[in-house]
Image: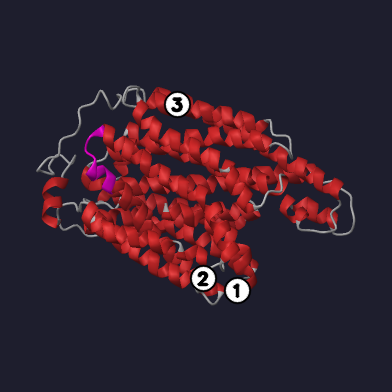
Amino acid sequence: MLLGLDVTLLYLALPALSVDLRPTGTQALWILDSYGLVIAGLLVTMGAIGDRLGRRRLLMIGTAAFAIVSIVAAFAPSAEILIAARALLGVAGATLMPSCLALITNMFTDARQRALAIGVWATTFALGMAAGPLVGGVLLEAFWWGSAFLLALPIAALVLLTAPVLLPEYRAEGTWRVDLLSVALSLGAILPLVYAIKHAAAHGFDTQTTVTLVASVVFTLAFVRRQRRLSDPLLDVALFTNRASGTALGVLLVGLVGVGGALYLVTQHLQLVEELTPLAAGAWMGPPALAMVVAAIGAPLIARRVRPGYVVSGTLVLSVLGYVLLTQVEGPGSIGLIVAGFALVYLGFGAVGALGSDLVVGTTPAHRAGSAAAMSETVQELGVAMGVAMLGSLTTLVYRDQMRFTDGPDGAASAVGESLAEAKSTPEVPPPLLAQAKEAFTSGLNISATITGAVILALAILAAVVLRHIPATGESVPAEPSESADDGTRDSVSTRGKLS
């Protein structure tokens, strides 16, 4: 919930803090991007550290750090300090995500209970994202921009007070050490990739994008090669060779590309085309959030009787129907249609997020659950970033192609040709030209939804075929904890007793 709120709160607070801190355009982008960039780069490392240090311990350390740095961010006197604070929040956030998911696998050894618990876990993040605009709107109307960061304090206090009582500790047996070279290689693989995606979204596929992508590929190959050689790797690359977990990771990645792009375009449409305030746009995101909650909770329950592959496939087909609705959006006055379409998209995301994450961590030995959870989280972070970059760029390309030959007053034509946001912020743009710009943006949304819908339909077929061998959780025998870690399946009992 805390991380979900943080994702969307800052977008509302940015205009107010820009007036106060006067960041340059580049600094404003780093205020937004440094958090997600650091999280994506450190997830794998923090997942492995949690396996070794103790997952509850890492969760509490990360929560305390998140609270402290949130105070620094709230009272940051300059843009530079705020950027640094956002990066440190990313470090703390990277400890929270895999720790939560890995602890769930320790607390729920029954496959049916674990799937439902992961569904609840997936729901809270989306609820945080959905509540962000509403909570942020209320806070920013009554307080200064820093109040958006201070919202973390009561949540962090709740975790720190209750975790020692309610959460069991888990630490894999042995005296394993974290391989620092593997950490460096993982950062070299992830950070350039995420940066390239974000840079391509803002500036297109240029030389800088190409260089960073090549660097990412080189570091990725070196990372995989080293993991294969180590007896105690930072990330067990065999995770990708397992058919169930490998396919689940692929479904999560591609599915989140569609969801991330759709979320970006829908919120843009509600504010730029429908001209809703951020608070009103956030309120309209309530029904999609409710659909996601229903799917995240309902899908694991259905998977007790129906094979998970078929459940994932069926909900992805419903997502395709959502993308079909988005292809029918025609401009202002389409709020109901776009919200209904996005609700179906989010419904598919709820099921895929819950069941996909369960397939990844549920087919991984307990002592590697933190690394597996981190890999699941990393894939989802990359999927959202790629979705914004790819579908955002495609929509922009369609928009600029349609607005290429516009005429208008001095300054208006160039502004309209750049983007709809630029057109709306330029007073010289006459209403007829602005209406044309809204239609061009909507056309870009329609085309992006068409292509994404086709890809998701193919993904639904793939999930049904490849995952059809996985039985319904009601058909499987619940895993029994073992006193020994020799089989690598469930070695938490003895260790949990020692540390508790």
Please state if 344 lies on the left or on the right of 177 as rendered. right
Q: Kindly identify which residue carries mark 2.
A: 82
Q: How is the image coloured?
A: secondary structure
Residue drawn at point x = 29 percent, y = 49 percent: 370
CA gap between label 3 and label 1 equals: 48 Å
Residue drawn at point x = 40 percent, y = 64 percent: 153
Q: Kindly identify which residue carries mark 3.
A: 313
Q: Secondary structure at mark 3?
A: helix
Q: Secondary structure at mark 2?
A: helix
Q: Is residue 48 above or below residue 244?
A: below
Please state if 120 lies on the left or on the right of 430 as rendered. left
Amino acid type assigned to the residue bearing label 3 in the image: Ser
Q: Which residues are magenta?
A: 103-111
Residue drawn at point x = 56 percent, y = 67 percent: 143
CA gap between label 2 and label 3 equals: 43 Å
CA gap between label 1 and label 2 equals: 9 Å
Of callouts 2 and 3, the N-terminal one: 2
Please state if 267 lies on the left or on the right of 149 as rendered. right
Q: Kindly identify which residue carries mark 1.
A: 21
Residue 24, percent from left and from top: 64, 70
**Residue situated in front as seen by the camera: 500 or 58:** 500
Q: Is residue 348 above or below residue 282?
A: above
Predominant SS of the magenta segment? helix
Residue drawn at point x = 74 percent, y = 40 percent: 332
Image marks 1 and 2: residues in contact by CB distance under 8 Å? yes
Residue 172, percent from left and from top: 18, 51
Q: Is residue 243 above or below residue 44?
A: above
Residue 462, percent from left and from top: 45, 26
Amino acid type assigned to the residue bearing label 2 in the image: Leu
Amino acid type assigned to the residue bearing label 1 in the image: Leu
Q: Is residue 48 above or below residue 251?
A: below
Q: In this rendering, does residue 179 appear at all?
A: no
